[in-house]
Image: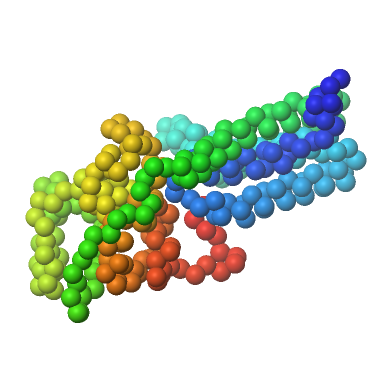
């Protein structure tokens, strides 16, 4: 028997691998919108939960490999519940929805209890099962780890301009404050009226009365926040800013750099402006390195958006 095979059969690491996989998979799926630091506490909590289950079942059965199998089953049921619920929640019989939390939770708990009872009384080749589950756990981690690693490398090697050339601005002795507020998804007045029958002229009149200018029939360069902001803040189309952004590409790597370190910001700061930004709930648009960044102060026990 090779050393690798012996190692895979001897050490039941799969509960820990199964515990961190869902966290990393979710992080990888949202890698352009979530800071890695947001996942540290869930990773730690899930890892410790796996360890606690392992110790509890070892205390009951006195067998690390059987304890690991039981811990892995409970972790799998826990992390798969939400996916199963979403898949079944629309199933109905004459308008009666069969799978809601009130019905699915008891089924899931009953399944967990049955599997624990069955495995505790069944003769199982725990060495082979441990080896197989260790391999499955390692293979599961390959994709999210590769996605996260690739994203970080692309961000570092992205050819998007990180230090844009500031435009010379003559702002005079008393330059005005500048507010750049994006009402993301807020429709133009004629679109709101034609499509939804909503007349917002009173709102626009009030803005004009305060000195604002309303750009009639205005359009954004792009229909998505990251694309539109990067383009407007750089005074250019994004395919001119980097060879990464070509028509039809879904690649968003580097757009956050264009937003955070734009021509507009560099020009105004060179002219003596201080930058004040606020939390948006969307990582790519948050200028956390601004002179003043305004956002909610979370307490230690408060959950972040990822959690």
Number of marks in picture:
0
Check the image and report above or below for 36 versus 114: below
Query: Is residue 67 shown left or right of residue 264?
Result: right
Along the horizontal axis of the image, is 101 left or right of 115? left
Q: Is residue 261 left or right of residue 57?
A: left
The answer to which of 149 and 217 lies nearer the viewer is 149
Query: Residue 160: x percent and y percent?
Result: 36, 45
The one nearer the camera, 288 or 94, is 288
| Color encoding of the figure | rainbow
Q: Within the image, what quadrant is residue 82 found in?
A: top right
Residue 142 position in % (x across, y down): 61, 32
- Residue ranking furthest to the top: 1
Residue 243 versus residue 293 in the image, above or below: above
- In the rendered image, residue 87, in percent from the top left (x then y), is placed at 49, 34
Q: Nearer the viewer, residue 288 or 29?
A: 288
Residue 112 makes an appearance in the image:
no
Q: Please name the residue shown 39% across and 66% down the image.
A: 290
Residue at x 30% of width, y 34% of height = 246
Q: Residue at x 34, y 33 (%)?
A: 249
Instruction: Please tell me which residue lies in front, 201 or 127.
Output: 127
**Quarter containing the N terminus:** top right
Q: Is residue 37 left or right of residue 57?
A: left
Residue 227 visible in the shown view: yes
**Residue furthest right as drawn:** 62
- Vertical comparison of 100 with 127: above or below: below
Residue at (68% x, 28% y) in the render: 136
């Amino acid at each position: 028997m090779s050393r690798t095979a012996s190692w895979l059969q001897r050490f039941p690491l799969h509960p820990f691998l199964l515990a961190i996989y869902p966290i990393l998979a979710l992080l990888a799926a949202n890698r352009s919108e979530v800071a890695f630091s947001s996942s540290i506490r869930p990773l730690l909590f899930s890892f410790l939960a796996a360890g606690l289950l392992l110790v509890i079942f070892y205390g009951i059965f006195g067998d690390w490999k059987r304890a690991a199998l039981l811990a892995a089953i409970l972790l799998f049921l826990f992390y798969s519940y939400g996916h199963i619920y979403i898949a079944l929640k629309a199933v109905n019989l004459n308008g009666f929805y069969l799978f809601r939390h009130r019905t699915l939770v008891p089924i899931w708990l009953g399944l967990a209890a049955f599997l624990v009872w069955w495995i505790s009384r069944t003769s199982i080749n725990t060495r082979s099962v441990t080896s197989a589950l260790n391999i499955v756990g390692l293979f599961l981690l390959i994709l999210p780890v590769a996605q996260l690693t690739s994203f970080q490398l692309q961000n570092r090697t992205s050819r998007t301009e990180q230090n844009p050339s500031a435009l010379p601005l003559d702002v005079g002795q008393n330059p005005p404050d500048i507010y750049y507020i994006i009402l993301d998804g807020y429709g133009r007045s004629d679109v709101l009226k034609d499509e939804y029958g909503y007349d917002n002229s009173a709102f626009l009149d009030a803005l004009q009365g305060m000195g604002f200018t309303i750009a009639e029939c205005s359009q954004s360069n792009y229909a998505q926040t990251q694309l539109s902001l990067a383009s407007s803040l750089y005074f250019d189309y994004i395919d001119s800013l980097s060879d990464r952004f070509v028509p039809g590409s879904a690649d968003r790597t580097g757009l956050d750099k264009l937003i955070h370190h734009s021509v507009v910001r560099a020009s105004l700061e060179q002219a003596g402006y201080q930058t004040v930004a606020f939390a948006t709930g969307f990582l790519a648009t948050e200028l956390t390195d601004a002179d003043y960044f305004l956002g909610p102060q979370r307490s230690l026990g408060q959950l972040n958006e990822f959690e």
